[in-house]
Image (cartoon, grey):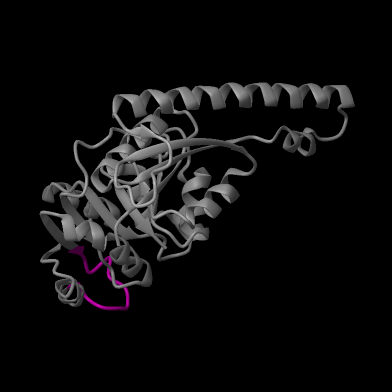
Amino acid sequence: MAIRKLLLPLTGTAAGEAALATALMIARVWNAHVLALHVRVDSRDVAPLAGEGLSGAMIEEMMTATERESLARAQSVRTMFEHFVTSQQVRVGEPAPGERVPTASFAAVTGREEDLVAQLARVADLTVVPHPEAAEEVSSSDALHAVLFDSGRPVLIAPHTPPAEIGRRICIGWNGTAESASAVFSAIPWMQRAEAVRILSADEYQRRGPAAQDLAEYLALHDIAAEIATFRPVDREVGAGLLHAAQEFGADLLAMGAYSHSRLRQLILGGVTRHVLEHARLPIMMNR
């Protein structure tokens, strides 16, 4: 299935600029539409957080300040969007029925970001999110986890620096789980266009389920010739070994399942998903 619509939650950070550039690159590859979404904070949500002991006037002042800051941020994000769209020569507006050209539009809405992003992601082929900030815990990336856990759709984590190209050399992180099978399904349209595909597997990564050879045989039925490579953990980190193997292949896209173990376990003990999210320098497409 071709990619026709991308959702891009934008917050206005530097990482958001890289994500916008990445999304527009994908739009040019697939002649797709990018919906850039900025979710404004609802000033009414400030009141319950104010706590006791504050007068009505103080709460009102806090709400006014929140509204003012929210409007300023929304304007800043919109300006960034318009600048990048112009520089990439992507047309602003919805495509006409049957039209196959890259387009983009911007929307600013008010509400809870994780709820709205998850809902809109259900009617998009792919959601592109910024790479988690260096100073930000991966666990607090609400948009990322909302898509992973509550949309049923794939999410692509953009790198800090936009890639020169995407989808030419693809790696699949395979461990036999339902999550990795979902990632493979989402990546099939990409793999059918790619110059080279490599399946990455490791004894330390494999779970109960089909082996890499089984996957290669399945992909061949889709006219995808995928080679198999075994990797080893780096410094006992399976995620580090996976990223190193993708780098050795010269991959410009890595598709993998996310959180085969529980998210809570990975937050406490670490895990492959968490390591990849924190350290990847190439686009990562993840599925649950």
Q: Residue at x 14, y 59 (%)?
A: 197
The x, y position of residue 277, in whole percent, is 37, 47
Please say whether residue 160 is visible from this viewpoint.
yes
Compared with 265, 81 (above or below) is above
Quadrant location of the C terminus? bottom left
- Front residue of 203 and 83: 83
Residue 237 in the figure: left or right of residue 264: left
Q: Residue at x 43, y 36 (%)?
A: 93
Q: Is residue 209 magenta?
A: yes
The x, y position of residue 50, in whole percent, is 78, 33
> Main SS of the magenta segment?
loop
Compared with 25, 214 (above or below) is below
Q: Is residue 232 magenta?
A: no
The x, y position of residue 134, in whole percent, is 40, 34
Which residues lie in the magenta part? Answer: 200-212
Q: Residue at x 36, y 29 (%)?
A: 85
Residue 255 in the figure: left or right of residue 110: left
Please say whether residue 232 is visible from this viewpoint.
no
Count of numbered marks: 0
- Front residue of 281 and 120: 120
Quadrant of res 62 = top right
Residue 133 in the figure: left or right of residue 216: right
Quadrant of res 180 = bottom left
The x, y position of residue 100, in whole percent, is 29, 47
